[in-house]
Amino acid sequence: MNTVTMEKRDNIALLIVDNPPVNALSHSVREGLVDQMSACAADDSIEAVVVSCAGRTFIAGADIKEFATGPKAPHLPDVVQKIEDMEKPVVAAIHGTALGGGLEIALGCHYRVALDSAKIGLPEVKLGILPGAGGTQRFPRIAGVENALDAILSGRHVKAKAAHKWGAIDKIVTADLTDAAIDLAKEVITKGPRRTGEMTIDGDKYDQAFFDGFRKSIARKTRGYFAPEKCIQCIEAAVRLPLKEGLAFERASIGECFVHPQSKALQHMFFAERQVARIPGINKETPRREINKVGIIGAGTMGGGIAMNFVNAGIPVTILEVEQAALDRGLGVVRGNYERTASKGKISAEDVEALMGLFTGTMSYDDLADCDLIIEAVFETMDIKKKVFTALDTVAKPGAILATNTSYMDVNAIAQVTSRPADVLGLHFFSPANVMRLLEIVRAEATAPDVLATCVDLAKKIGKIGVVSGVCHGFIGNRMLAQYGREAGLNIIEGNMPHEVDKALFDFGMPMGPMTMSDMAGLDIGYLNRKGMDRADYETRATDWIDRVVEQDRKGLKVGAGIYDYDEGSRVPKPSQLVMDIIQEESAKLGIERTGKSDDEIVERSVLALINEGAKILGEGIAYRASDIDVVYANGYGFPPYRGGPMHYADQMGLAEVYAKICANAERYGDRWWKPASLLKELAEAGSSFAEYDRKNAS
Ligand code: NAD
C-alpha cells in the first residue's frame, strides 16, 4: 500500500503520510519516506520538501505491533538520517501529536511548523525503552538538555507552544498548516538545510555534577526502573559525543532495554490497559445511558473524592449526608483539596469557586430524584447499605443507575432489595478516590448490559481505568490483597519483624510494605471486621498479634502509633519495641520457634499468594483476563508496573515453576490457604501461560 504520496506545489514537494488511524511508522511508511526523499533529491525542479500527514494527526509513533517481530529495513534511524542528510531543506508540518518515532522523523527534518493545538513527545520510557531513532541525541541539541531530560524521562506530551519556546518548533500557526509549511520551505531554500545532528551542546555547563543532581531529583519516581537511567546516559552521550558516536551509544542502549524483562512487562501493561474495555456481551452497538447529573450518598473519605471526579469532568453532583455537620466536613475536605491544587498554581481561585459551584449538599433523598447515576459510599455495613438502596429505589428516576462503592459486600444482595436489580452495579473506587486511577466496575448477576457499558465509558470520561469484576468477597483486588496481607502477617509471627517484611517488599518495588500500608489505612477497620467474624473463618495466627496492637490503642498512623511508632507529626515508620515484644510473645504462645526468612523468601511467598488467588479469580470468571488482574494490581495496589502485574510476573517465572512452588508451599504451610488454583495446574501442565489463556479467550 502506498502510504506516502507526493504532490508538487511549485518548486516544493509536499509529502503526505496517510496510514490511518494514527499514521504509525509501519514498514510501508518508512519505505515510502525513503523512496520519496530519493525522488525529491533526484528531481531538479524540487528545491525543498514538506513532510505532512493526512487525517487527525502527524505520525503518532512506531508501529507497536512490529515490536514483537522486529521491524524490517529500512529501519527508523536510517530513515531519519536519510531525511537529515537531504541537501534540500525539509520542513515538518505537525498537527495532532508527533510522538516517539513521529517526533524523531520531525527532528530529522531541518525545520518544524506546528498547529498551536499540536503536541510532541517521546513516550518510549513508559514502554521500558528509549527513543532509539536519534531522539536522545537530537532532542537535547535542539531543545536544550534540561528540556530533553524533562520530556524523555517523563514521556509526557509537550504542547506546541512550550516546544516552540524550547526551540524544538520554529513556527506556530493557528490554521492553514500546509500553506505555512510550504511558505517556510520556500523561505529557507536559500539558507539550505539546518541539521539538528550538527548542532553542539555546551559541555561545560552539563558536567557530571549536573547529571548526578538530576538523577537525585528523579530517584524516588524511577526507583527500580531500568530505562530511565539508560535515557539519562544517552543524553549525557549527546552532550559529550559527536552525533554518529552518540547514535551508536543510543543503539546499544536501546538494545539493552529491549532484552530487559522490564520492557516486556511495561509493554504488557500498555496493552493490558487497552484491553480492559473489551467486555463479553458489550460492544459499540450496546446502548448507553446519559449521565448528566450524579448523586453521591455519604461525604466521608470516599464520597467526597468520588464526587470530585465527576465535577472535574463538568458533571454536577448532589451529595447526601445524614447530618449537616458531616456534609460540611465532607465538602470542606473537597474545598481544601481544590485550594491546595490552586496554591500550586494548577487552577485559579475562580476555578475553585466554579468547581465548588457544581456541588449541591443535601440531607433529603428527594433531591436525588433527577440524578442519572447515584453512588452509595456509606459505612461498610450490609444493613445500612440495604436501607440506603431501599430508599433510593423509591426516589430514583426510572433508568437511573444505582451503584455501591462497597469494598467487599455482595452486590447481588444489595441489588435484590430494589425493584430494579438490572440498574444496580458496584463502582469500587480506590482511596484517595480523586487521585487513584483504578475503578473496579462490579457486574452483578442482573446488571443490564447498557448499565455496564455506560459505566465503562464513564470511567474513561473521568480519567479512570475501569476494570470489570464479577461479584465475590473483595472483588479482584481486595480478594487478592487478603492473601498477601495474611502471608505477611504469618511471616511476622513465624520469625521476621514488620520492618523486615516491609523492606523486602519495598525493595521488590512496592510503594510501601504491607505493614506500613496497614498503619496508613488504619488498623481499626480490620480489627472491627474480625470481631464480627467467626475465628474459624480467618487465619488468627496472622492477625492476633495485630489485634493486640490495636488493643494498646495503636490504630495506626492517624493516632501516631500502630504497628510502628511515629514521631510527632511524622509519617516515617519506626520499629516499635512494644510491638516487637507482642510479636515475640504471640509466637511463643503458639509454640512457634521463630526463624527469619530472607528477603527473597518473603517476596516469593507474598507474590505466590497473589498469583494463586489471581488464578482462582480468573478460573472462576470473576476477571475476564489475566491482564485485567495485572491492571488492577498495578494501578490499585502498587505492584511495580515494571514487573507487569502478578500474572505477567508468573508468566515470566514460568507457570510450571510457579505451580511447583505453590505445591511446595502447600506441603510446608498446609493447604488451607495454599491449595493450588485448578486453572494454574491446568496451564502449568499444558506448558501454557496466562498470556496464552488470554489470547485463546479473546479469539
Ligand atoms: P467513611 O466512614 O469515611 O464515610 C462514610 C460516610 O457515610 C460518613 O460521612 C457518614 O456520615 C455517611 N453515612 C453513613 N450512613 C449514611 C446514610 N445512611 N446516609 C447518608 N450518609 C451516611 O467511610 P469511607 O471510607 O468513605 O467508606 C465508604 C464506603 O466506601 C464503604 O463501603 C467502604 O468499604 C468503601 N471504600 C472505602 C475505601 C477506603 O479506603 N476508605 C476504599 C474503597 C471503598
Image (cartoon, helix red, strand yellow):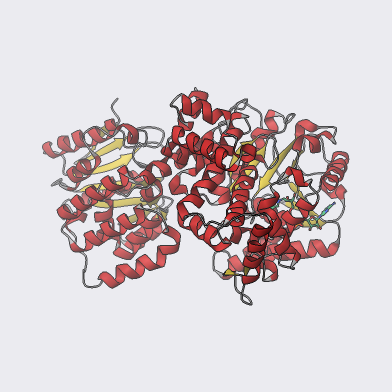
Would residue 203 be found to the left or right of residue 591 on screen? left
Horizontal and vertical percent position of residue 228:
36, 56
Residue 95 seen by the camera: no
Would residue 225 be found to the left or right of residue 672 on screen? left
Horizontal and vertical percent position of residue 163:
36, 58
Q: Give the quarter the ligand 1 occupies.
A: bottom right
Horizontal and vertical percent position of residue 461:
60, 44
Residue 577 seen by the camera: yes
Q: Is residue 47 above or below residue 681?
A: below
Q: 629 or 540: which is nearer to us?
A: 540
Q: How many marks?
A: 0
In the image, farthest residue toward the top = 699
Quarter of the picture containing the N terminus is top left
In the image, farthest residue toward the bottom = 568
Q: 165 or 6: which is nearer to us?
A: 165
The image quadrant of residue 496 is: bottom right
Q: Is residue 441 above or below residue 128?
A: above
The image quadrant of residue 433 is: bottom right
Q: Residue at x 79, y 53 (%)?
A: 531
Q: Residue at x 32, y 69 (%)?
A: 212
Q: Residue at x 42, y 39 (%)?
A: 653
Would residue 611 be found to the left or right of residue 473 on screen? left
Horizontal and vertical percent position of residue 535:
76, 47
Q: Residue at x 22, y 59 (%)?
A: 237
Would residue 381 be found to the left or right of residue 550 on screen? right
Q: 451 or 667: which is nearer to us?
A: 667
Q: Is residue 395 above or below residue 170?
A: above
Q: 616 or 344: which is nearer to us?
A: 616
